[in-house]
Image: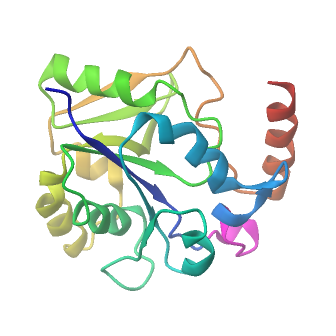
């Protein structure tokens, strides 16, 4: 039986390096950044959730359910993941940030295959050199563990998953897959790359 996989796009942060602009809504080549992310992952999953703590009405215009952090105070990606895990009945949840417009079109099948090969609880993507802690495929049953970790005052996603049986799936064959946008300069470079691809 094939696994049901939902996704959450994390758009809940403060985006301080973008001058406080809501990163998911910043335009890249005429479309909101999150639209590029949606286009990449939509064919790979059943349902998409958008985790946003501001501009929820704008995000709702993309046609997906918008969820806000259960924990108040902009506590980072873990808070968004915990909320999403409580809003899905899928076997697995794909987690991606809103500012990675070049995500692999084979992200889910490769990460799922890695989990099944190792009988792991979750997979984290890597660009071949570095793990990408906010690009995960995980079982929603891990929610209690993550919630306890966050409520203990911890914030770092990689410290959390290190406590679990995880696998790393390398996407070294797609070196730009996880290029993200934190500054206006990076945005301009990425726009040029997308135009060339």
User: Compared with residue 195, is residue 30 higher up or lower down, i.e. above or below?
Assistant: below
Q: Residue at position x 31%, y 81% from top? A: 71
Q: Where is residue 58 in the image (x, y as percent from the top left)?
A: 63, 75
Q: Residue lying furthest bottom in this view?
A: 72
Residue 169 picture quarter: top left
State left or right for residue 183 relative to residue 171. right
Q: Give the range drawn in magenta.
A: 15-23
4 over 11 or under it: above or below: above
In this rendered view, identify the residue nearer to me: 176 or 87: 87
Q: Where the C terminus falls, by quadrant?
A: top right
Asked which quadrant contains residue 3, the reply is: top left
Residue 102 placement (x, y as % from top left): 64, 35
Name the side, left or right, on which 129 lies relative to 3.
Answer: right
Looking at the image, what colour scheme do you see? Answer: rainbow
- Occupied quadrant, residue 55: bottom right
State left or right for residue 68 relative to residue 6. right
Residue 114 screen position, x and y as percent:
27, 21
Q: In which quarter of the image is the N terminus?
A: top left
Q: Residue at x 26, y 73 (%)?
A: 153
How many labels, in total?
0
Residue 17 in the magenta stretch? The answer is: yes
**In percent of the image, x 18 and y 16: which residue is there?**
117
102 part of magenta stretch: no
58 relative to 141, above or below: below
């Amino acid at each position: 039986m094939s696994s049901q996989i939902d996704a959450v796009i994390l758009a809940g942060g403060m985006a301080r390096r973008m001058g406080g602009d809501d990163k998911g809504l910043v335009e890249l080549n005429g479309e909101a950044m999150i639209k590029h992310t949606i286009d990449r992952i939509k064919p790979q999953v059943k349902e998409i959730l958008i985790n946003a703590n501001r501009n929820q009405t704008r995000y709702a215009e993309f046609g997906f359910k918008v969820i806000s952090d259960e924990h108040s105070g902009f506590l980072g990606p873990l808070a968004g993941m915990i909320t999403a895990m409580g809003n899905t009945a899928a076997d697995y949840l794909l987690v991606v940030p809103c500012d990675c417009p070049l995500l692999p079109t084979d992200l889910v099948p490769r990460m799922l295959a890695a989990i099944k090969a190792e009988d792991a609880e979750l997979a984290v993507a890597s660009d071949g050199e570095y793990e990408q802690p906010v690009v995960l495929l995980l079982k929603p049953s891990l929610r209690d563990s993550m919630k306890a970790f966050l409520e203990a005052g911890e914030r770092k996603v990689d410290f959390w998953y290190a406590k679990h049986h995880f696998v790393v799936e390398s996407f070294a064959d797609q070196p730009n897959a996880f290029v993200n946008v934190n500054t206006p300069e990076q945005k301009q470079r990425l726009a040029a790359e997308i135009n060339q691809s």
